[in-house]
Amino acid sequence: MEQLTLGGIVRPVIVGIAGCSGSGKTTLARELALELEATLFPFDYYYRDLAHLPLEERAHSNFDHPDSLESELLLEHLEMLAMSKPISRPIYDFATHTRVPGKTERVEPAQVILVEGILALHYVELRGLFDFSIYVDAPHEVCLMRRIHRDVRERGRTEASVKEQFEATALPMAERYVLPSREFATLTVQGTDSLDWSVEQVLSRLHARGLR
């Protein structure tokens, strides 16, 4: 793998992975993390803590808008990993829309860092850190189906609430912020293709650029 340097320090290769919620980007990121022995850096840990709001109001917040993420902390932590320094990232509870108080998770840097989130290609400051970027594309109906399956099983949601949120915020925000970010991707893969094929495309392109 090509050794990039930052202030004399061997710098990890940083790869951004974006796409709409339910597109398959998280599945791709996890598989690539195994293939590349990479540190996975998901945006999901960086949602703002809504503990100051009543539970009902939290549930109706717009979690697909850029302001829902503490992007300042996210950028600070990614810059630390880029300098091969460990971080203590927050732990987020999706059932209550709050951060677990007083607890963090130590994350160690690796030769490759995979930055994964719907808005990974939205923030200009983050894009400046990427050596390579991927956009995972998928039809809205596929994204909704997968989102229902995930949120009901993993986040304590009801199917009706997932559909309501999708129509009210997820879809409009995707069209406003996520879809336009496709133009900044080095590579676009289809979230409906086989996982093996998507992984092969990414690894081939990384190899061609001397990043693997």
Image (cartoon, rainbow, N blue to C red):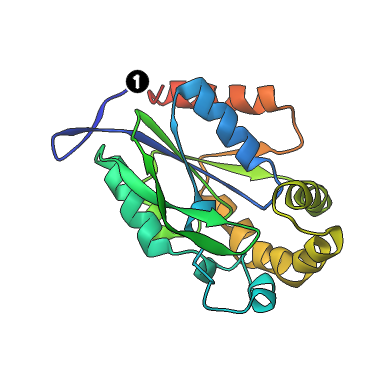
Residue at 68 percent across and 23 percent down: it is 197
Q: Quadrant of the N terminus?
A: top left
In the displayed structure, does residue 40 sit left or right of residue 21? left
Estimate the x, y position of residue 148 in percent, counting from the top left: 80, 52
Q: Is residue 33 visible?
A: yes
Estimate the x, y position of residue 199 in percent, counting from the top left: 60, 26
Q: Is residue 119 visible?
A: no
Rendered view: 149 above or below 61: above
Rendered view: 14 above or below 205: below
Q: Which residue is more in the foreground, 193 or 110?
A: 110
Estimate the x, y position of residue 31 in percent, counting from the top left: 59, 28
Estimate the x, y position of residue 35 in percent, counting from the top left: 52, 21
Q: Which residue is more in the foreground, 205 or 46?
A: 46
Q: Which residue is mark 1?
A: 1
Residue at 69 percent across and 27 percent down: it is 195
Q: Residues within 10 Å of mark 1 (few under 14, many from 20)?
A: few
In the displayed structure, does residue 125 sit left or right of residue 141? left
Q: Quadrant of the C terminus?
A: top left
Amino acid found under the numbered disc labelled 1? Met
SS of the residue under disc 1: loop
Residue at the extreme left: 8
Residue at the extreme right: 160
In the displayed structure, does residue 197 sit left or right of residue 163? left
Q: Quadrant of residue 178?
A: bottom right
